[in-house]
Image (cartoon, helix red, strand yellow):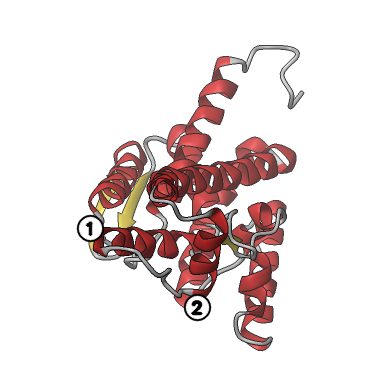
Amino acid sequence: MRGITDTVKHLLIINVLFFIAKMTMQPGLLDDLFALHFPKNDAFKFWQIITHMFMHGNFMHILFNMFALWMFGTAVEQVFGARKFIFFYISAGLGAALVMLGTYYLQYLPLESDILSAGFTSSQIHETMSTGRVMQGVNAVQTDQLQSMFYIFNSSMLGASGAIFGVLVAFGMLYPESKLMLIFLPVPIKAKYFIPGIILLDFISAVTGQSFFSPSNTAYAAHLGGALTGFLMMWYWKKTQFNKNRWDR
């Protein structure tokens, strides 16, 4: 694996091993254990905050993510070094997860509050979310609310995309003049324009629900969370680069 830095190489291996295990074991078993579930769901486990970023849905999912990790992560690790890079990568993945969960909570909690104020109990709501059986006595509006809650409650997030979006931001800030190309747009574009453009498209997708290049079930908020976390870390490190007490000395 020439041309790949050590940490990127190890991350590639771990992701591939997880994917092979998922494909060879009982369907859904590893997703239930390691994908990130909504915290109100009984399937949620604390370790999923980390493990979800090593899980992927299908071959194309892992292929594109690992290609991006190799392409951009190697260049970033060459500047950061192994220790700083893995800290950055995991932090961006955590930021992505927290933003995604925060987005879900902002959608879920007002709906739950409306259902509770209508006289239904938390245990009734939990049973409906867990089984899909709608409670008796709900009206049409409440049924729609419960359906929206059911989607969030039973959603799961998996993939390295959030962490990789953080790496993309780091690459763009470290190598702003590098020229990049999309497969379907074979025109070189500088990283300082290309990467903000990709992030802007994800922001539009998150707001409108309109997918441009990704599947409709893509966690756009997670991409934005990873990118934001990466930007904040890069900004802070640049601001403190001459501080003798900074963490990475």
The picture places residue 15, in percent across and down from the top left corner, at 64, 67
Q: Residues within 10 Å of mark 1 (few under 14, many from 20)?
A: some
Comparing 56 with 122, the one in front is 122
**Residue at mark 1 to residue at mark 2: CA–CA distance:** 23 Å
Q: Is residue 237 above or below residue 27?
A: above
Q: Is residue 174 above or below residue 126?
A: above
Secondary structure under the numbered disc 2 in the rendered image:
helix
Q: Which quadrant of the view contains residue 176?
A: top left
Quadrant in the picture for residue 200: top left
The image shows residue 66 at horizontal and vertical percentages of 54, 64
Secondary element under disc 1, as helix, strand or loop, is loop
> Which quadrant: the N terminus?
bottom right
Amino acid marked by disc 1? Gln
Q: Is residue 114 left or right of residue 243?
A: left
Residue 65 percent location from the top left of the image? 50, 62
Pick the residue in front: 79 or 237: 237
Residue depicted at x 56% and y 21%: 236
- Check the picture and name the quadrant holding the C terminus: top right
Mark 1 and mark 2 lie on one chain; the one further toward the N terminus is 2
Above or below, 3 relative to 131: above
Residue 245 image-quadrant placement? top right
Residue visible at 47% across and 42% down in the picture: 225
Residue found 66% across the figure and 66% down from its top = 34
- Is residue 66 placed above or below 178 in the rendered structure? below
Can you tell which mark lies on residue 59?
2
Q: Residue 198, image x and y in percent?
A: 32, 48
Name the foreground residue: 244 vs 209: 209
Residue 151 lies left or right of residue 158; in this view the side is left
User: Mark 1 = which residue?
Assistant: 210
